[in-house]
């Protein structure tokens, strides 16, 4: 039925994106018309069996059906509902009059009660004014039929017109009642629809404002974080005395905790807006779990906790999954274990099971020796901003977003996250996801291990923020790269035209020319760097700019705060492009 209605509306050129009240009115036109046609065809069949011949009533009915079908067809070209309300009202009155006049039936016609339906139909299609207009026309029609009746000889044995007078009064009361009901109900329905539309419009505007706010906040927060985290990483990679190294590592862990909170807040807003996309690609599942363990081992060791890793030797070497989101889930689960375990150990494991359909189920477990979770709190800890027992946030800190985001991400990947077991000896969280195994990619390189050098590459960094330029410069030095710098778009274009660079980093937000315009100018020019690898550096992780980024000739983007891994990937890409040239 839904498909049939869709085809009919396509034929009648009814736009489903019209405002709700307008759409309901135009749908009422063809729905009422279709119902009228169906009932009158049935009426003609009944009359044929009753009379056994073609009658005057058949002719009237056939004429009315033809007019209604023609009016429905007109919707394709003309969509003024007032026109159709007038048309239907006129047709109903003409039908009653044609039935009542031939034998001077007048007000005693069997079709007179149908006049009371007019205000309801007119009001629903065209509103209060149409209902009132039909009321006036209906009263006039009743008066005319009453005059026809009293102009003829009385038909009662009493020799008066009592019955005709009663019929007129009953018709008037019914018409008045239907008009009042029509005005009240139809106006109320359309008022509610209008309010719903206004509410929806406000929600859309609020969502757009929220998106702009989050993009601005992301940029404003990530830019200083880029300086703090990037320079801290550069310090940690340098030759520091033990005491200073411990301080730098503590700063680094605090930075990472702050970044996780920021990412959780932004990801939750994306999930609410339905804009967070899962991007599976070829990854090693054992490496994902090993990197999560490496990231948390120093924090756990600093708290006196040991970390046991079981990396799942039975898992396939390469699978298709979003390793970034899987790692995010593991990071949040490990963060929970670190937070709620006072002494003992944390166990991180991966088990793989081959399914009958050839796919693989990966079971990631994070177990701790903490205090456990009360049975009544198990479900609530997956609610946003809920941390279980009262006082948890005050004692342990946190936002209460980690586990809800884990569950949302798992659902987006077709998996699940939950508490497998809990008790006085600790808690085990189980994250399960089903993936496809793939062949090992030929020539696939390992991830960043800090030992690569790319001193032969020429790199240009364009950013209007001095701290960001300093961060990029210090991080690139770790790869043996001495970069050139530009403080805005025009100076970047001039530098790229004067010298042949292998890799150009452009900040998305720059004065005069933004990163996209700068990249487009470099690509369209004849300078020595027009074939360079161009990477956008941005604090905004939204996907809405990806089409514009690609059309500008930018191959990829890295998100602030910039990490050594992201730079290593960009340098590898530039090196591969240089080798292929």
Image (cartoon, rainbow, N blue to C red):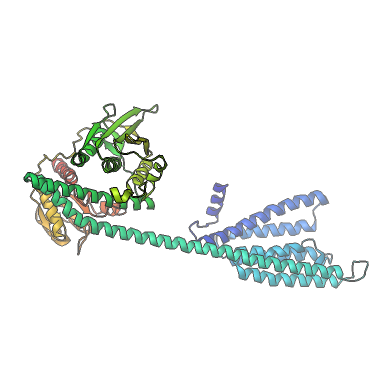
Q: In this image, 216 relative to 457: left or right? A: right
Please state which of residues 295 and 484 is positioned toward the viewer in this rendering. Answer: 295
Is residue 89 visible from the viewing direction of this image? no
Q: In this image, 18 relative to 490: left or right? A: right
Please state which of residues 356 and 25 is positioned toward the viewer in this rendering. Answer: 356
Q: Residue at x 40, y 45 (%)?
A: 380
Q: Can you give x and y, in whole percent of width and height, for residue 122 in the image?
A: 64, 65
Q: Quadrant of residue 297?
A: top left
Quadrant location of the C terminus? top left
Q: Can you give x and y, in whole percent of width and height, for residue 26 in the image?
A: 57, 60
- Residue lying at the far right of the rendered structure: 157
Q: Can you give x and y, in whole percent of width and height, for residue 62 in the image?
A: 72, 56
Q: Can you give x and y, in whole percent of width and height, for residue 518 in the image?
A: 19, 58
Please state which of residues 32 and 361 is positioned toward the viewer in this rendering. Answer: 361
Q: Quadrant of residue 218?
A: bottom left
Please state which of residues 436 and 91 is positioned toward the viewer in this rendering. Answer: 436
Is residue 545 visible from the viewing direction of this image? yes
Q: Residue at x 69, y 57 (%)?
A: 65
Up-down: is 85 above or below 560?
below
Q: Residue at x 26, y 27 (%)?
A: 313
Q: Quadrant of residue 100?
A: bottom right
Up-down: is 329 above or below 312?
below
Up-down: is 120 above or below 260?
below
């Amino acid at each position: 039925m839904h498909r049939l209605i869709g085809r009919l509306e396509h034929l009648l050129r009814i736009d489903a994106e019209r405002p709700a009240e307008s759409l309901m009115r135009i749908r009422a036109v063809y729905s009422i018309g279709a119902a009228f046609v169906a009932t009158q065809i049935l009426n003609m069949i009944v009359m044929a069996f009753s009379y056994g011949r073609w009658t005057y009533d058949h002719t009237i009915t056939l004429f009315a059906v033809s007019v209604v079908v023609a009016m429905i067809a007109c919707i394709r070209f003309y969509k003024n509902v007032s026109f159709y309300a007038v048309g239907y009202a006129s047709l109903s009155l003409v039908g009653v009059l044609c039935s009542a006049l031939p034998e001077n039936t007048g007000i005693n016609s069997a079709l007179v009660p149908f006049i009371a339906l007019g205000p309801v139909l007119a009001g629903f299609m065209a509103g209060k004014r149409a209902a009132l207009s039909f009321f006036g026309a209906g009263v006039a029609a009743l008066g005319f039929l009453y005059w026809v009746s009293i102009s003829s000889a009385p038909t009662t044995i009493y020799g008066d017109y009592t019955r005709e007078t009663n019929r007129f009064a009953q018709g008037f009361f019914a018409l008045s009642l239907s008009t009042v009901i029509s005005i009240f109900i139809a106006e109320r329905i359309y008022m509610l629809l209008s309010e719903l539309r206004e509410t929806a419009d406000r929600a859309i505007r609020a969502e757009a404002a929220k998106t702009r706010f989050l993009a601005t906040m992301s940029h404003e927060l990530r830019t200083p974080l880029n300086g703090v985290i990037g320079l801290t990483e550069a310090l940690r990679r340098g030759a520091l005395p033990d005491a200073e190294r411990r301080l730098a590592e503590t700063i680094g862990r605090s930075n990472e905790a702050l970044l996780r909170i920021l990412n959780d807040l932004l990801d939750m807003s994306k999930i609410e807006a339905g804009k967070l996309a899962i991007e599976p690609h070829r990854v090693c599942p054992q490496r994902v779990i090993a990197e999560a363990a490496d990231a948390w081992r120093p924090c756990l060791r600093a708290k006196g906790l040991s970390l046991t890793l079981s990396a799942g030797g039975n898992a396939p070497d390469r699978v298709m999954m979003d390793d970034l989101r899987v790692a995010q889930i593991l990071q949040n689960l490990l963060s929970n274990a670190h937070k709620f375990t006072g002494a003992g150990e944390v166990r991180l494991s991966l088990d793989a099971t081959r399914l009958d359909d050839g796919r693989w189920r990966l079971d990631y477990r994070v177990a701790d020796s903490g205090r456990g979770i009360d049975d009544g709190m198990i479900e609530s800890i997956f609610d946003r901003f809920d941390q279980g027992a009262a006082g948890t946030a005050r004692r342990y800190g946190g936002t209460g977003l980690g586990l809800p985001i884990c569950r949302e991400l798992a659902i987006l990947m077709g998996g699940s996250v939950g508490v497998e077991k809990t008790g006085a000896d600790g808690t085990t969280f189980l994250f399960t996801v089903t993936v496809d195994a793939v062949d090992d990619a030929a020539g696939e390189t390992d991830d960043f291990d800090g030992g690569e050098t790319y001193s032969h590459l020429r790199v240009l960094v364009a950013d209007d923020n001095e701290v960001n330029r300093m961060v990029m410069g210090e991080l690139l030095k770790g790869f043996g790269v001495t970069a050139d710098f530009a403080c805005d778009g025009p100076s970047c274009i001039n530098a790229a035209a004067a010298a042949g660079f292998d890799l150009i980093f452009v900040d998305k937000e720059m004065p005069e020319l933004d990163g996209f315009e700068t990249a487009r100018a470099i690509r369209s020019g004849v300078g020595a760097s027009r074939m360079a690898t161009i990477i956008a550096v941005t604090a905004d992780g939204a996907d809405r700019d990806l089409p514009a980024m690609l059309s500008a000739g930018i191959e990829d983007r890295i998100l602030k705060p910039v990490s050594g891994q992201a730079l290593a990937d960009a340098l590898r890409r530039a090196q591969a492009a240089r080798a292929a040239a």
